[in-house]
Amino acid sequence: KNEVEQSPQNLTAQEGEFITINCSYSVGISALHWLQQHPGGGIVSLFMLSSGKKKHGRLIATINIQEKHSSLHITASHPRDSAVYICAVSKSSNYKLTFGKGTLLTVNP
Amino acid sequence: GAVVSQHPSRVICKSGTSVKIECRSLDFQATTMFWYRQFPKQSLMLMATSNEGSKATYEQGVEKDKFLINHASLTLSTLTVTSAHPEDSSFYICSARGGDYSDTEAFFGQGTRLTVV
C-alpha cells in the first residue's frame, strides 16, 4: 500500500462546479503539500499545511491530522484549472517528500 | 515563495551521450536540493538528495555513476545523465530548500523532459 493515496485518479467537471480532491496518508508527517502540475510538466506549489485550513483565491486546503486526511477544494472551477494535482507529505523523520500519484482534473467549458 | 529555475526544459540527445541539467535557486541559498524522476502516469520518485559542498545521497536503486550530481554552490546543483539510453527518457525535476525557509518548505523547478533517441 502506498504511503500517500489520492482519490479520485481522474476527475472531469463542468465549468463552475465545486471540486474536491482527497489525500490520505499513513506515515507521521511534519507537513502536507498540494502541488499543481500542468501538461508542460512544471510543478507549482499551491499549499503547505500542517493543521487546519488554508485559502488562496478559489482554492481551499484542509487537513485533519488525527484522521491523516487532507482535501483540496476548488470553487467555481474553470478550464484553466485543468491540471494534475499532487498531494505530497513531508515525513517527520527526515523531511523527505513522498508523493501521491496525482489526480488528473479536466474542467470542460 | 522562492524561485527555482531549471534548465533546459526539454532536451533530446543521442544514445550514449551525456546530458547535464541545471537547477538554480534564484533568490535564496539552497543548502539542500532534491532530484526527482517521473515516469508517465507515475508519482515523482526521489533520486537523490544533495547538500552544498558534500556528496549526494542516492536512493536505493539509483545508480550514482550514471546520475552524477554536483552541488558546488548554494545556488546551483547539476544532474548529469551519463551514457544516456532510451530507458533514461523521463521527466526530471529538482526542488530546493534552505535560506530563511523552514525544512518542510519545498520549491520546485519547472522540470526537464529528457528524450534519448
Image (tube, grey):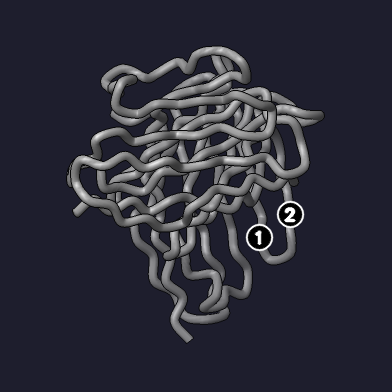
Specify the farthest residue to the bottom: A109
Q: Which mark is residue B80?
A: none
Q: Chain of mark 1?
A: A
x, y percent for residue B39: 29, 46
**Residue B113 figure quarter:** bottom left
Q: Is residue A66 above or below residue A14?
A: above
Q: Residue at x 56, y 37 (%)?
A: B95
Residue situated in front as seen by the camera: A61 or B71: B71
Q: Residue at x 44, y 63 (%)?
A: A40
Rendered view: B40 above or below A27: below
Residue A55, disc: 2
**Residue at label 1?**
A59
Give SS at disc 2.
strand
**Which residue type carries mark 2?**
Lys
Q: Tag 1, which secondary structure?
A: strand
Give me the C-alpha separation between circle 1 and circle 2: 6 Å
Q: Position of residue A72 (x, y in %)?
A: 57, 52
- Are dots 1 and 2 in contact, CB under 8 Å? yes
- Left/right of residue B88 with respect to residue A56 in the rendered view: left
Looking at the picture, which amino acid does disc 1 mark?
A: Leu
Q: Is residue A2 left or right of residue B74?
A: left
A77 in relation to B90, above or below: below
